[in-house]
Amino acid sequence: MDPLPEKIVCIGAGYVGGPTMAVIAERCPTVEVTVLDQDAVRIAAWNSGHLPVFEPGLAEIVGRARGRNLRFVEQQAGLAALAEADVVFISVQTPTKTEGEGAGKASDLRYVEACARFIAEHARGHTIVVEKSTMPVRAAERIQQVLASNRTGATFTVLSNPEFLAEGTAIRDLLQPDRVLIGGEDAAAVATLQALYAAWVPSERILTTGLWSAELSKLAANAFLAQRVSSINSLSALCERTGAEIAEVSAVVGTDSRIGPKFLKASVGFGGSCFRKDLLSLVYLCEHHGLPEVAAYWQQVVDLNEWQKSRFAAEVAAAAKNRRIAVLGLAFKKDTNDFRESAALQVVRSLLRSGCEVLAYDPQVDGARFISELGISAGFTAVSTARQALAGAGAVAVLTEWDEFRTLTWGEAALAPGATVVDGRGIVDRAAVRQAGRGLRVIGSPPA
Ligand SMILES: NC(=O)c1ccc[n+]([C@@H]2O[C@H](COP(=O)([O-])OP(=O)(O)OC[C@H]3O[C@@H](n4cnc5c(N)ncnc54)[C@H](O)[C@@H]3O)[C@@H](O)[C@H]2O)c1
């Protein structure tokens, strides 16, 4: 087995960089891990008792490694660490471009390119540069070009090592990954990265491929996951019209061993910072490479998801007995404080624009941050308990599958007379809602 690298640096202390480096540091106590970010507030939070990312188990792991072989430092304070690093991970955002060629679809690589320039300037000797961010296929070419323009004589190998963790289960996914993927042509560099992961991941789960296959595999994996969500959601609409029940259909379809039961739950639509942007990136790549039919195929997965969110918002507005709506859940899924691209953003915006007042509760999302992303504050109030959100509401929109929403005591909720619960996750206790004399609509279930 190749020796472990001695020093590694990660640029980007976000939802991926922070947890991933914490797990590497915890599992490889001899490796010095330095995480850099240009956002000083985020770095201060990583060094505090209130981490910027909420993930079950994360605080404990950070607690064990921080100050031992794990450091979070502001970008400019990390120059020495960068100069000495054997391996540098790039783990910054790759959002959808908002201007220029490919706007609205292509991935914006400006943050990645800024990292490459920074590494080119400050790295010394030979450094393995690892794409941890999700990239369009052949992005490594651009990184290699930027790195090659350095004036210090430093040399580099670029590898692709996309991250497959899911928010909400990030620590479990990192500790027991289905697979770790390393793409690259330089066998020695691949072996170094393999050695790092082999400290806790069984070798048969560490897959190696060519660089371009690794880059595309990450986009492909997210596209397949999102496609399953849109497939089941398309059928949820048909269930509502025909008397079929989507939970029963999912259970039956999922027992086919060729299909499997995961990711077959009907919902208000997928959210999160990845699926939409990665699908759009794939659509753009297909268009760019002269494959309009393939682009249209994947575009429909995005379009169906948008339609699912908008039809849900319309249903909530139509069900409301007054203009006051309780929203339960702002995070894009349970067990995270991340609300990027969450269904709540679109549903709440739509409700506010149609003149509703929204009282929202989420156990982890910061209301002020949500409002600033929402862009509209009039009519929106974030409250600190579900009970407060429900008081006086003419309709309830359940948008995140937090466990506490499964066991709400509907008999005690002070909803307005005639109020309806509209469940976008299929999780509420249906008998309890009906016993409390409330109307109920569940996504993918025919009206009772
Ligand atoms: N969030 C997920 O669940 C997930 C899962 C797998 C892969 N990914 C991919 O991983 C990448 C990172 O995602 P994320 O959710 O961690 O993003 P994030 O926005 O949470 O974090 C990115 C961090 O990078 C920092 N940054 C940006 N440019 C910088 C620069 N030049 N120098 C220093 N710091 C810089 C930002 O300040 C920010 O803190 C994306 O490409 C994403 O698609 C995300």
Image (cartoon, rainbow, N blue to C red):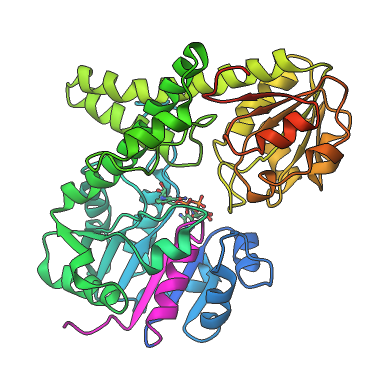
Q: Position of residue 193 (x, y in %)?
A: 24, 71
Q: Relative to 190, is 223 above or below?
A: above
Please name the residue shown 20% across and 72% down the image.
203
Q: Nearer the viewer, residue 411 or 213?
A: 411
Work out which quarter of the rendered image holds the C terminus and state it.
top right
Dividing the picture into quarters, in which one does residue 223 lie? top left
Q: Is residue 76 left or right of residue 356?
A: left
Please name the residue shown 23% across and 42% down the image.
137
Dividing the picture into quarters, in which one does residue 309 lie? top right
Q: Relative to 282, is 179 above or below?
A: below
Work out which quarter of the rendered image holds the N terminus and state it.
bottom left
Q: Is residue 3 left or right of residue 238?
A: left
Q: Relative to 418, is 415 above or below?
A: below
The answer to whether one can see residue 98 in this image is no
Q: Position of residue 189 (x, y in %)?
A: 18, 70
The span shown in magenta is 1-29
Q: Nearer the viewer, residue 116 or 439?
A: 439
Q: Position of residue 17 (x, y in %)?
A: 45, 61
Number of residue marks: 0
Q: Position of residue 271 (x, y in %)?
A: 51, 36
Please name the residue shown 46% across and 36% down the image.
265
The answer to whether one can see residue 344 in this image is yes
Q: Nearer the viewer, residue 400 or 264?
A: 264
Q: Nearer the viewer, residue 120 or 440?
A: 440
Q: Is residue 101 magenta?
A: no
Please name the residue shown 48% across and 34% down the image.
270
